[in-house]
Image: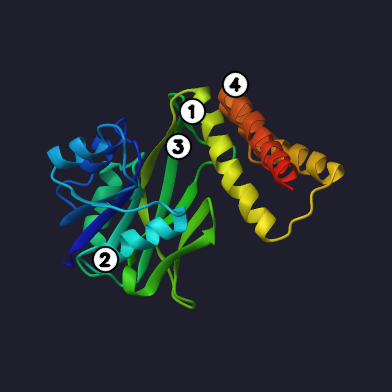
Amino acid sequence: MVKLSAVIIAFNEEKNIGRCIDSLKDLADEILVVDSFSKDNTLEICNQKGARIIQNKFEGHIQQKNFALSQATNDWVLSLDADEALTDELKQSIHAILQNPSKKGYRFNRLTNYCGKWVKHCGWYPDSKLRLVNRNFAQWGGINPHDKLQLSLGLDEGFLSGDLLHYSYYTKEDHYRQIEYFGQIAAQEAIKKGEKVGVLKVMIKVIAQFIKSFILKFGFMDGLTGLKISYRSAFATYRKYQLIRQVK
């Protein structure tokens, strides 16, 4: 069986980090937390639970996650956010595949909890993520804040059963704070690319996002929760373009 490092990036995650680390026990040979100088009790909890801690200045999600990959002791790495945790089924699937991995990376579905409700639609599930990789053949890419772990060109991925649980937002205020945070980052990236912003384009993008989430992705099947998510997703699109216009 190959040895496994679990790497977690964190900043002020005292609410989530303990659950994440606990879900990795009896699976990972190393649990590494890369912390962006948290101000709460994140580090105390990590220490109590035996995680190795490295503090590193946060310069972007992609940069921080690639740094975490590089700091792992083992070549096989499970990359998580602090607000995620493994189900027992997923834990068993990972344990089984590590006996003799036939591929260089494996993905699995992520199930998100939104304000106490598990979301099965809105384009949020099945939210397939590549998170278990041989780091010699993988790196984080994408555009901040929408990072994604990718294998080297031409390599096939495997798929594992079981869900990665994602505890996204506890309140609507949490969601709006994240919309603002992600909106600022996305706006900066769009400005770097020279993206044009017109009123008609914004209107079309906002309406399209709501239709996609609530109708095309069956958000209505999640009832009031689906409606709230679809509305706030559309608002997030509007806020991003509003921020682009403000900066320009």
Tell me the distance, in whole angstroms, between the alpha carbons under discs 2 and 3: 25 Å
Residue 136, horizontal then vertical, whole percent: 33, 74
For mark 1, what is the residue?
A: 174
- Disc 4 is placed on an element classified as helix
What's under tag 3, amino acid-wise? Thr
- The answer to whether the residue labelled 4 contacts the one labelled 1, judged by CB atoms less than 8 Å apart, is no
For mark 3, what is the residue?
A: 112
What's under tag 4, amino acid-wise? Leu
Please say if 57 is above or below 213: below
- Disc 1 is placed on an element classified as helix
Quarter of the image where one finds residue 71 = bottom left
What's under tag 1, amino acid-wise? Asp
Tell me the distance, in whole angstroms, between the alpha carbons under discs 1 and 3: 14 Å
The first of marks 2 and 1 along the sequence is 2
Label disc, if present, on residue 224 of the rendered structure: 4
Q: Nearer the viewer, residue 59 or 103?
A: 59
- The answer to whether the residue labelled 2 contacts the one labelled 4, judged by CB atoms less than 8 Å apart, is no
The first of marks 2 and 4 along the sequence is 2
Tell me the distance, in whole angstroms, between the alpha carbons under discs 3 and 4: 16 Å
Q: Nearer the viewer, residue 43 or 246?
A: 246
